Image (cartoon, grey):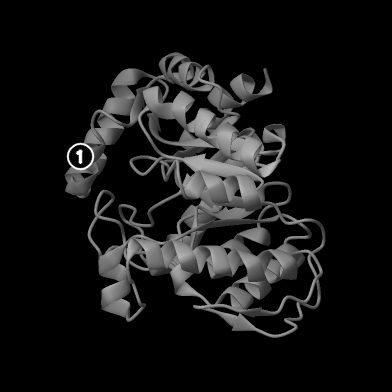
């Protein structure tokens, strides 16, 4: 499971057009792999998110991209952070993730969530529904996807999805781990305890202990061993050899993409020592690992490698 994940959240890079875009993405994945990250993740969106840019900014379909990255990497796990359940039929998603596992020789991971970006749904014709609808859909989907990934042939006559003796052949190379994204203490973390191998949360650092306590409570009620579940925390970082260079990278990114200015105060910005200290405090809360994105300067050669070299020793402790 993920202990140190590198997420690529944006594909708008200065001076890079469609013809050169994949090369920049591959370079980041290779730096991540070489510097100690265990997982490379991409967002499952079709429009860019409002805190990262304009809806019209570049956004690649995640599973096509992950399958391509599988051919340029050897050891890192590959995952969406996270798949929007509302975008694909669950049986099709099971086939897609299995195909990723086969072409990557056993490195696929399923990250999944209920879906939340209403603009994207409305613009592209995906049913959005209510909050309750989306969580009901996610739970039904898991009752189809998980058995298919485990070599079973599920039948479900649900409110949202129906399958009959659903076959998934060829099967995965190995056991595909499942991550559920989101930190909702009543619904999401209950589903983590019931179905998942990993939870990935976004919240203020001071709220992490409460999230961990909520997950432990659900595990107790369901008879699940809490130690079986990895809890990771999602962060944004701008690292460079010096704090001055990191701040310059961040301001240059905001000048290109003003929406990134919303990350002032939440992104971890600094040189290696400062960044390491900030992440050490996060890990001290009790989470098992972190996922990190670098929307401001991940495309700059050497920055992802520097981050991996900075954080990998903390995770190994």
In the picture, residue 141 is in which quadrant?
bottom right
Report the residue at 27% width, 27% height from top.
Answer: 247
Name the element at disc 1. helix
Looking at the image, the residue that sits furthest to the front is: 221
Residue 301: % across, % down: 47, 40
Report the residue at 31% width, 56% height from top.
Answer: 15
Report the residue at 54% width, 23% height from top.
Answer: 310
Residue 68: % across, % down: 61, 65
Report the residue at 30% width, 34% height from top.
Answer: 249
Looking at the image, the residue that sits furthest to the bottom is: 164
Does residue 61 show up?
Answer: no
Position of residue 111 in the picture relative to residue 273 (left or right): right
Residue 25: % across, % down: 49, 54
Does residue 158 show up?
Answer: yes
In the foreground, 269 or 281? 281
Position of residue 134 in the picture relative to residue 67 (left or right): left
In the foreground, 159 or 18? 159
Residue 194: % across, % down: 63, 50
10 Å crowding of disc 1: few (<14), some (14-19), many (20+): some
Q: Which residue has dot 1 on it? A: 261
Viewport quadrant of the N terminus: top right
């Amino acid at each position: 499971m993920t202990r140190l994940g590198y997420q690529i959240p944006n594909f708008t890079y200065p001076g890079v057009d469609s013809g050169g875009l994949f090369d920049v993405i591959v370079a980041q994945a290779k730096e991540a792999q070489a510097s100690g990250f265990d997982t490379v993740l991409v967002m499952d969106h079709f429009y860019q998110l409002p805190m990262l840019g304009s809806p019209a900014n570049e956004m690649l379909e995640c599973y096509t991209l992950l399958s391509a990255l599988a051919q340029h990497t050897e050891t890192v796990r590959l995952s969406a952070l996270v798949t929007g359940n509302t975008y694909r039929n669950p049986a099709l998603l099971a086939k897609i993730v299995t195909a990723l596992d086969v072409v990557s020789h056993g490195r696929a991971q399923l990250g999944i969530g209920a879906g939340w970006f209403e603009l994207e749904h409305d613009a592209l014709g995906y049913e959005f529904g209510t909050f309750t609808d989306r969580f009901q859909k996610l739970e039904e989907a898991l009752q189809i996807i998980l058995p298919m990934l485990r070599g079973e042939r599920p039948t479900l006559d649900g409110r949202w999805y129906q399958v009959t003796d659903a076959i998934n052949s060829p099967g995965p190379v190995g056991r595909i781990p499942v991550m559920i994204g989101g930190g909702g203490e009543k619904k999401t973390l209950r589903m983590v305890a019931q179905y998942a191998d990993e939870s990935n949360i976004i919240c203020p650092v001071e709220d992490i202990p409460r999230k961990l306590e909520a997950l432990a409570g659900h595990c107790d009620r369901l008879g699940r061993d809490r130690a079986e579940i990895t809890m990771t925390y999602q962060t944004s970082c701008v690292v460079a050899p010096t704090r001055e260079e990191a701040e310059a990278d961040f301001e240059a990114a905001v000048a290109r993409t003003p929406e990134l200015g919303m990350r002032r105060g939440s992104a971890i910005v600094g040189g290696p020592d400062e960044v390491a200290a900030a992440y050490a405090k996060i890990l001290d809360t009790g989470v098992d690992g972190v996922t990190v994105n670098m929307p401001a300067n991940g495309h700059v050669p050497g920055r992802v490698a520097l981050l991996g070299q900075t954080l990998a020793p903390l995770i190994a402790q």
